[in-house]
Amino acid sequence: MHITRILAIRHGETAWNRDTRIQGHTDIELNDHGRWQAGRLAQALQGEPIAAFYASDLSRARETAEAVARHHGARVQTHHGLRERSFGRFEGQTWAELEARFPVEALAWRKRVPDFAPPGGESLLQLRERVVSTVEQLASRHPGEQVLLVAHGGVLDILYRAATRLELQAPRSWELPNTAINRLLWSPEGLSLVGWADTGHLQTQDGSETLDERSA
């Protein structure tokens, strides 16, 4: 059986990560620390064989992937299916603002109600369908090879759950640090987990890794 190895990476830090603002599909670029993280990631992966470089079409993910691809003399292919969950009218707000303005919706979000969708946004069920189908499509192109996927906190959370067979409502006990190296395997039977949240390449600079969306 041909297996595809996947390096699944969350984008570098943004100003909205620092401010705990909900990003979703809003196109926020990396901040200076995020660019530093992307550079460290590129150095860490420069010796890895990578057949293809894929990223969400949002700039924070694309820029992170491009930092790695440059070290390999390669180009990044973007894919809309790797975008963060759409949070509709919640985007741009902090968690404190969200809980004050939409307490009922915020509770549904915290409880990870699978079919709850923020006004104008996606539910967890919709996100899972989009992400898993996209990754299956991309991974199936590269049997026996390794690919890089740079995406977002919510996307990485879905991949972890798919690889470990966890339900959408299961509480999250794993971390989703910016530019951590996560390793998965894909075969026609599905995803499996190899390694998660390796941040060794970031340990020369002190700083916490802020999560993208608390529901991710």
Image: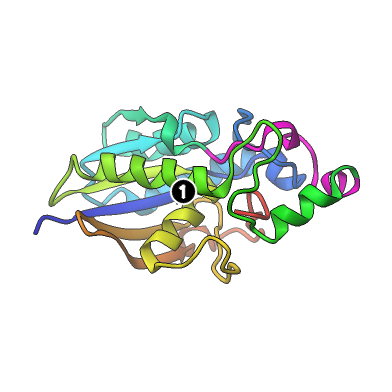
Q: Which residues are magenta?
A: 84-100
> Residue sitting at 55 percent across and 58 percent down?
176
Q: Please state the horizontal and vertical placement of residue 129, each as a whole percent of the image.
A: 43, 45
Residue to which mark 1 is pinned: 128
Question: Where in the figure is residue 143, as x and y percent of width and height?
Answer: 14, 48
Verify whether residue 92 appears in magenta: yes
The quadrant of the rendering that contains the N terminus is bottom left
Which residue appears at 19% of the width and 54% of the height?
Answer: 188
Q: Residue at x 63, y 31 (%)?
A: 28
Residue 122: quadrant of the picture: top right
Name the side, left or right, on which 139 lies relative to 112. Answer: left
Which percent across, then down, holds residue 70?
34, 33
214 sits to left or right of 148: right
152 or 181: nearer the eye? 152
Residue 173: % across, % down: 57, 71
* Three-letter code for the amino acid on which mark 1 is drawn: Arg
Whether the magenta-drawn stretch holds residue 158 is answered as no
